[in-house]
Image: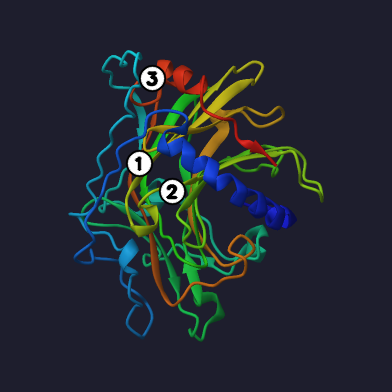
Amino acid sequence: MPFKDALAHFKAQIKDLQQEGQKILSGGGGQQQQQQHYPPPQQQYPGAQHQHQQPPPPIPQATRPNQQQYQPQFHPPQQGQGQQPFPPQQPTTYWQARLDPGLPVSAEWEHKLGNNNGWGNNEVEHYTAEGENSFFTPNNLLVLRAISSPNHPDAAKKYTSARLVSRQRLSRPRGSLVATLTLPCAAGIWPAFWLLPYEPFAWPTDGEVDIAETWNGDGVNHSCLHWGFYTPQDTNKHRVVATPVSGMATGRPVRFEFAWMQDPGTRQGRLLWWIDGQAVMKAPIPQGTRPMADFVVLLNVAMGGNVCAGQLPREGAYDMVVHEMKMMEEPEAGGWARFERDWSWVRKGNMI
């Protein structure tokens, strides 16, 4: 997330990687997964009460969830010819986010507040703990709502959003984190599902993992890893794969998975990213980063800034929806055997 002055260089290289990412999901590294299609939403679910005197802005059609639309199904990737299917298993879940409208969001998530000097990227949003920016729905979804009100008389309320940090850590030397998300895709909008060490930490020295992030409505996911000491050149300490994801820009829920395997003594290990059950990137754990067990989950919807090339969102509300999130002892649909199989063929992130 805090890419500093390297963003222009970083984004330019990402554009060159998007075509390669498409090949991964379309069969370049394995069998193509059947895409799930969801009907357009028909009605708005009950949201939080807005505190403006004027009625709340309309919710963009592509990011407006309802209960009927969001019943995501997960199908593991098809086995290639000559491969034996993995035996059925139920990985042990050691933490699952409670998406309970009877609980406050703060029960499991810490709200980060304010603008914090643009969060290192000249972003315009002010993060709040208000119920209009983060809330549970009656049908057990967690919503982070970014609201663009450029004509609001209060500068701190022109662009508001939510940035949540899990109180739960990964807490194990190896495991898997899975989430099904609907990401808002629009100009000036930058949602992210990512990991940082618990505070205090040094960025980027202690490490950062980006599992899901997209900006300016391009429908491309960026799987990233960041580490090392910050320098003005800001090179040779980023890995990234840019993957176009079918249906993401039109509101299809997408399943993201990230698995880590680390030796607690040497801290050496491996990381692997999946989208809709298809491996898209692998990377060794960089030297000098914090233990993976120290990392926590972050969810946020940023607005404007360097990554969005200065574009600001149109007036309206933009929802990031969490349908499910859990931490497991091993990856889905095959466990560590699946990890080893996918590690054998999936590409490493491009070094930047």
Kindly identify which numbered label has been placed on residue 335: 3
Q: Residues within 10 Å of mark 1 (few under 14, many from 20)?
A: some
Residue 319: quadrant of the picture: bottom left
* Identity, as a three-letter code, of the amino acid under mark 3: Gly
The residue positioned 35% from the left and 14% from the top of the image is: 83
Q: Could you tell me how far apart the alpha carbons at marks 2 and 3 are, in whole angstroms? A: 28 Å
Q: Nearer the viewer, mark 1 or mark 3?
A: 3
Q: Measuring from the top left, give residue 254's x and y in whole percent.
A: 36, 45
x then y, percent, for residue 97: 35, 41
**Residue at mark 2:** 109
Quadrant in which residue 287 is drawn = top right
Around disc 3, counting alpha carbons within 10 Å, would you say few (fewer than 14), some (14 to 19), or many (20 or more)? many
Residue 97: numbered disc: 1
Inspect the image, locate mark 2, and give the three-letter code of the amino acid beneath it. Trp
Mark with earlier residue (2, 1): 1
Question: Residue 132, percent across and down?
Answer: 37, 67
Q: Is residue 2 visible?
A: no
The reply, left or right, for residue 330 in relation to residue 192 is: left
- Amino acid type, label 1: Ala
Residue at 74% across / 57% down in the picture?
Answer: 5
Q: Nearer the viewer, mark 2 or mark 3?
A: 3
Determine the residue positioned at 35% across, 85% down.
Answer: 54
**Dot 2: what SS?**
strand
Answer with the quarter of the image where residue 75 lies: top left
Q: Earlier in the sequence, mark 2 or mark 3?
A: 2
11 to the left or right of 324: right
Left or right: 181, with 102 as reference point: right
Compared to 30, does 153 lie above or below?
A: below
The local secondary structure at tag 3 comes to helix
